[in-house]
Amino acid sequence: MKEPRFGAPDEEFDELDFAKDALSRISIVAADLAARQKSCVAGCLAAKLWIARKSVDSADASQLPRLQRRLPKLIDDLERVCAWPHAPNAQHPILRSVINPGTYRSLQEAETRACKGISAFANGPPAVRDGYFKKLDQFSRAVMVVRYEESKEPATKMQIHDTDEYPPHVNSSLYSVLRAHSLCTCTSDCGSTGTGSVKRHPARLRLRDDIVKVDGCVAFDLLLSASPTAYDYWQDLQVRVTLKDKGKKSVKYMDGATKAPAPGRVERSKVISPGSLCSLVTAKLGSRICCRVQDPELHQLYDGSPIVQQVDPGPSISLRGILQTHRLSNRMKLVLAYIISRSFWQYYDSPWMGTKWTSDSIHFLREPVVDDDAPDVERGALYASSPYFVVEFSGEEADEFVEYCDSFSVIYRYPRLLALCILLLEIGRGESLSLEDHGSMEANLNSTWTLAKRLADKHKAWGDFDYPDYRKAVLNCLSRKLFEESSTTDQTRPEMDIFTRKAVVYKTVVQPLENLLKLLGFSDKLKTLDPIDSRGPGPLLAKPPPPALPTSSQGRDSSLSSQWLDKLANINSYICNLSRPSSTRRPVRIAILDTGYDDQAIFFQNLSRTRRIKQWRDWAENSETPVDENGHGTHTVALVMKVAPTADIYVARIAKDRTSLRGATGSIAEAIHWAATDCEADIISMSFGFQEEIPVISRAIDAAELHRDGKILFFAAASNSGANRKEAFPATHDSVISIRETNSNGAFSDSNPPVDPNGPIVLGTLGKDVPSAWLSNVDGEVARLGSSVATAVAAGVAAMVLMLATAGLADPKANLPPELAKLWTRRGMLAMLTRMSQNMGNRSYFISPVGFFSGKDSARIWNAMADVCVG
């Protein structure tokens, strides 16, 4: 079923995202109104809306159905408040205009309408206000996470509802038939996948997120290697097992005859005797072989079908190998974890648990690339949505992978559940774990559980994979209390309660992961994942690779960029002269989150510059002295100081380089908090990006904006991947100003992400071949390009604007309106930067301070700034 959408047919919004944005934006509008009008009611409204937004963010995925039922009423009521005392429009025009304005003018108009409505509502009937506030409080409480331990449903009565489970005999029949028929008889030198002299063709069982039923049977997909050693051909095989137990297979009539049940049409078939499947696989028929299990026999169906599992020749690759050589996106991780968890639950009480479920037993096979436009590749693609289980029939392994450990002094007694936990940990963290063998099952259980618990509890261990519901599912696997309290049998024989534990696995692991996929909108797209990229879809430091040997000669473009920066220096001198009478006011503060800076570089040997750097914090290595091993941070810090030479600078080293940025999301969030609270920065520059939203960073930005009453500016790099990738995060965050790269004449680079023709305008500034400082082992400057460079320039330009506004507000002769303080907010600065920009076409605006300041005296400049803030 398609998830509900919100809005007009020509402008649809995801209802949940729309509600989040509406709560955030109207909360900020109400807070601004409360500050200007000294309105307690508006302040209370702002706080309650923000609490409601945070409640939605913290809601567990299992709360999604309840949340979706409440959202329409929430949105209707919020539109009613903004339109007060007039009747609200069913299409919610005010909220839609505030969230997705076509122009900055329309945004200002929408927020003005909302302010008028909120003001009228605040002065309206107290009973109406109190009733609405009560509804908001009820909403916030209703969508809060209900922890499993707080659920009123007794664990002993836990049932599985609406699951596509099939009878236990299906798994057992499949296992028995394959064990009997996978013996290799085609050659004398067949390899062995088991122990002793048993020789088999390697087989892979497809793990699925659903169950395929054909003619009253459950259909399983397998791949069998035609050769036990060469892997030159994988035979596509479908095995069907009837849903009816063989004990109920016939109906006896009065004459003594029996009639076998025929679910569906009767299809012609022949019996495959043990050993003959080997010759069938080696025939390499080029079609899918369909078989059906009838009692203990395996029947080959008469009709073949086109190959479904198209895979390239070659050995399969283990999940452990994938994690070592490839990088999975967050979406890939979630889909893979769900498929494995669901399959694990499906086979939990079957012989398929005789083989350990580990990152060594989960495999992938390369699939042909069918895209004609894709570049030629020697090897096929790997897909996270197509995992396989290695089919093995090892008698020795079965004794080790027991379901319950009945030994003394054992912390956790469920080896299978612990194995699933380790798999989920490895997938979520993006790296395999090396588990030490301590010589006994008891010692291994205790050691593995302790390691898993430590990693699951450690927030930073998850990097940018910040999904509380996923972590909760992992912790559920580790919960002794959860499985012990669910036991329905005699407490002296808990090892007998395997079926109840299987139900708990579904309720506390599989179902939460499924709900999480639905919440994120991934559940309908499990089969449409991109191939796993060996280079990784990880975070980008929004920059091209550094040159092997930077030189001081950077060519014509570098010279033009230098001239552009020199013109800014003249403007800064003018601003500095205006600011001298107001020297008692504190300078503008800029926090730079990057790879640090090299204080031994030539640029920083100027004492007047080093005095501008007020604080240093290192989250990468906790160094007390400035350090930069990459050069990117040094280039960024120096460039910001060139553009805004009188600003105070605060440097946060959040990563050593691009590769370590992926695991630094927690540090980035902490650095944002540090910059907003400890440093009280006016501007935070973030010259990095991720391909997906990082929740922990989003929350840090939201918290910083709330702490500063919206008076803080965030700048971030849009992306350098051109049309190949969308705009990066955090540039996509509602509170962040996204910056793109241009040359000195304002031409936008092809490396920028595509512009949405129906979206808001985009801003860009100088970012091509811009010279700035590098590491101390390089003489002179290095020219760099990219949206990260443009972000540093834009942050500096914003500081210039704030310095000029500070001077004007302090000058009584200027007589500037108090609304000029809006320049410290995202909305005000966006409007100002747009006013300073040249329209380059395609909804793209080039930030050009030179063009704005040229030919204007201070009065005209201040008047222009006032027009932006008041108009």
Image (tube, rainbow, N blue to C red):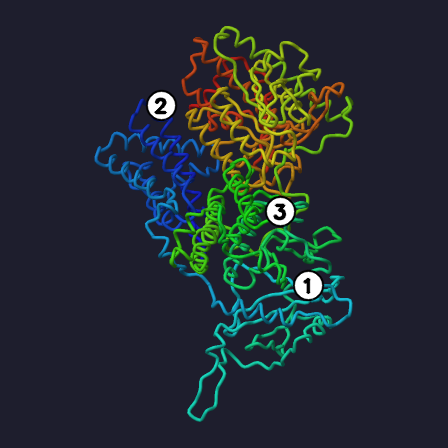
Pick the quarter of the image with the N terminus.
bottom left
Q: Residues within 10 Å of mark 3 (few under 14, many from 20)?
A: few
Tell me the residue that label 2 is attached to. 35
Contact between labelled residues 2 and 3, with CB atoms less than 8 Å apart = no
Tell me the kind of residue under disc 1: Pro
Image side of residue 871 versus residue 782, left or right: left
Secondary element type, mark 3: loop
Tell me the residue that label 1 is attached to. 202
State the count of labels: 3
Q: Which of 860 and 586 is in front in this view?
A: 586
Tell me the residue that label 3 is attached to. 437
Res. 648 image quadrant:
top right
User: Could you say where residue 317 lies in the image, as x and y percent from the top left?
Assistant: 68, 54
Tell me the kind of residue under disc 2: Ala
**Residue at the image point whose x is 55% and y is 32% from the top:** 738
Image side of residue 666 versus residue 287, left or right: left
Res. 314 image quadrant:
bottom right
Front position among marks 3 and 2:
3
Front position among marks 3 and 1:
3
